[in-house]
Image: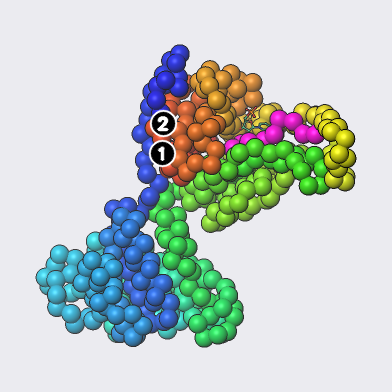
Amino acid sequence: MSSTQFPFSAPATEPVPSANFLSGKHIVLGMSGGIACYKGAELCRALVKAGASVQVVMTEAATEFMTAVTMQALSGRPVFTSQWDSRAAGGQDNNMAHINLSREAHAVVVAPASADFMAKLLHGRADELLSLMCLARPIASVPLIVAPAMNREMWQHPATQRNMAQLKADGTYVLDVGAGEQACGEVGDGRMLEPHELLAELQAFFTPKVLAGKRVCITAGPTYEAIDPVRGMTNRSSGKMGFALAQACANAGAEVCLVAGPVALDTPRGVSRVDVRSAQDMLSAVNMASQNCDVFIACAAVADWAPANAATQKLKKDGSGAVPTLSFVENPDILASVASSPAALAGRLYCVGFAAESHDLLAHAQAKRVRKGVPMLVGNIGPDTFGQDDNALVLITEQAPVATERADKLSLAHWLLSHIAPQLT
Ligand code: C5P
């Protein structure tokens, strides 16, 4: 952020660490036999693009669906398929690939994990390299993550469900399955998650859980104030910062309720979402959602005013040149009302506001923090953030203000959490 935005006293600038928690991780990607191997190949590519190193281990059945040549090309490393493979593994030349491969891993990810492979894992069977390696991995330091992939009948079968429950009890991290049309033509649960969903799960897995056990309510996006049934007033907020915050909080272990104005954004993974339209709707939703929360983050660009009496029928142009006269009422201030609630006043609910300004950001944001009665307020320049994927923030608390460089919104969200988390008891 250039200091010219803070003409009176430029705050100190803090670096914003990247929110890519897969960067630098070493993943052993296990593939068992199933048509979802093609998604495993895409996942491999995505992991490499995210900066992880990937060592692929395939069962014999997996090589019927995807060649080791393809997986070597995607991972940039020779693929292991046999326990009798005598090549050096994990830097060791002792002919013990099943031991060495997992020793340098941050996680073993089996995608796809077939019904048969899950049954093998459950029983601790070790008659081929992948299951042998899973059994021989250091259980306390190398997590095992499996992405099930199978036909819906196989998925629903009591044996599979029993196996899955026991795998979880044994400490395996079992991912959800997707629902929908399957390769066999049937429709139901059991599809492996899509590569981008698997990547999101793995990003979440590696995110430090600074908000474990906390409940967070976040508002995001604009509000829409109706003039008549077809027209209304809104603003240019895209909701991207609030949605990034919701994603960051959920990945950091919080239970998140996102109260969203009208935006065209997908709900972040693991977040429950309430869609609203007007400021009044948002206030009602927040009053419900913020109960028993530990943190309230007001990121929405709430309209200051709403038309006093929205017309129930479309206002018509009559050709005379006459224009309608609109009068306005002030909207409730959601943040100020939550900040003055008993939970906030008692220190059980930590409130964070946002200020989108066009000039004199520092002075306006500092004044707004006091006016809203919140311990933390995040200032940004409105025209520089609305609709953008990146932004720069200034953090206002009782202490000296802190600014950031421009960074992507998810990284900024995690940076903000690193300042919020220490304030929670
Ligand atoms: O007053 P202003 O709109 O600049 O305040 C911004 C902060 O207050 C944001 O956190 C916004 O979400 C919140 N706010 C609110 N209800 C309003 C107006 C703003 O919660 N009616």
Tell me what residue is drawn at x 30 percent, y 55 percent: 51
Contact check, label 1 and label 2, Cβ < 8 Å: yes
> What residue does disc 2 label?
404
Quarter the N terminus occupies: top left
- Colouring scheme applied when the structure was drawn: rainbow
Looking at the rendered structure, the kind of residue marked 2 is Thr
Residues in magenta, as a range: 296-307
Picture quadrant where residue 170 is located: bottom left
Q: Is 305 contained in the magenta span?
A: yes
Residue 145 visible within the image = yes
Mark 1 Cα shell of 10 Å, populated few (<14), some (14-19), many (≥20): some
Residue farthest to the top, as pictured? 8
Tell me what residue is drawn at x 33 percent, y 80 percent: 66
Residue 43: x %, y % from top left: 38, 66
Left or right placement of residue 106 versus residue 269 in this view: left
Residue 373: x %, y % from top left: 63, 24
Residue 407 tag number: 1
Looking at the rendered structure, the kind of residue marked 1 is Ala
Residue 98 visible within the image = no
Residue 269: x %, y % from top left: 53, 56
Left or right placement of residue 414 versus residue 336 in this view: left
